[in-house]
Image (cartoon, helix red, strand yellow):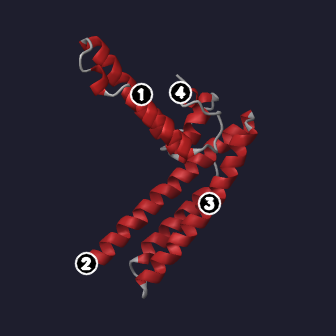
Amino acid sequence: MNYFQLFGLEEKFNLDTERLAQVYQKLQRSVHPDRFAHASSQEQMLAVQKSSMINDAYQSLKNPLKRAEYMLTLRGTEMPNEQASFKDNMFLMRQMELREMLAEVKFADDIDAAIFEATQVLEIEFEGLFKTMQTQLADNTEEANQLASDNLRKLKFYQKLHLELDRLEDFLFET
């Protein structure tokens, strides 16, 4: 089942998240266990399976990066393994620079300022890449989808780096 069809949404990246949440609630109510309390065990099991599928679909469409990955999968675009190396040497260099930036945060004279600056760098670069990926998804050509796939992988890297920065911040302010 196509998740967009399940929620009655057009298959596009920018979607009405309020409508998504409303339809999700309606669909979940329709398969709620209380509605099947007096049904056969097979009907109860089917309701649980439908509820699980609805939840998976909702989680995939609610999160922008998961939504992009789902769209690319629907389009038959092969998603590169996250462990595979990047072909983009400039991005590899940027990864090293960003990791160095994070490593230097703990040695900064003003840790608050260093964390703020690192957060700004990550957010600005993430947003620029995110907008590029949105445009590529809207173009929906084979080449654009492949580029969107590569950019999605880069966005996941930024997301992980941001989590690392959050953990570092927690660690630095706990001690």
Give neighbour class at mark 1: few <14, some 14-19, many 20+ (Cα, 10 Å).
some
Q: Is residue 83 left or right of residue 87?
A: left
| Amino acid under disc 1 | Met
3 or 1: tag closer to the N-terminus: 1
Q: Which element type, helix, strand or loop, lies under badge 3?
A: helix
Given residues 58 and 30, the one toward you in this image is: 30
Q: Amino acid at mark 3?
A: Glu
Query: Would you place residue 30 above or below residue 144 in this image?
Result: above
Three-letter code for the amino acid on which mark 2 is drawn: Thr
- Observer-side mark, 4 or 2, equals 4
On the image, the x and y values in percent for residue 27 come to 44, 30
Residue displayed at 75% across by 40% down:
139
- Residue assigned mark 3: 127
**Which numbered disc, 2 or 1, marks the residue that appears first in the sequence?**
1
Residue that badge 1 annotates: 53
- Residue to which mark 2 is pinned: 175
Q: Earlier in the sequence, mark 4 or mark 3?
A: 4
Disc 2 from disc 1: Cα separation: 43 Å
Which numbered disc, 4 or 2, marks the residue that appears first in the sequence? 4
User: Foreground mark, 4 or 3?
Assistant: 4
Q: Secondary structure at mark 2?
A: loop
Rendered-image quadrant of the C terminus? bottom left
Q: Residue furthest bottom?
A: 109
Q: Earlier in the sequence, mark 4 or mark 1?
A: 4
Quarter of the image where one finds residue 171: bottom left
Going by the numbered disc 4, the residue's amino acid type is: Leu
**Looking at the rendering, which quadrant does residue 140 occupy?**
top right
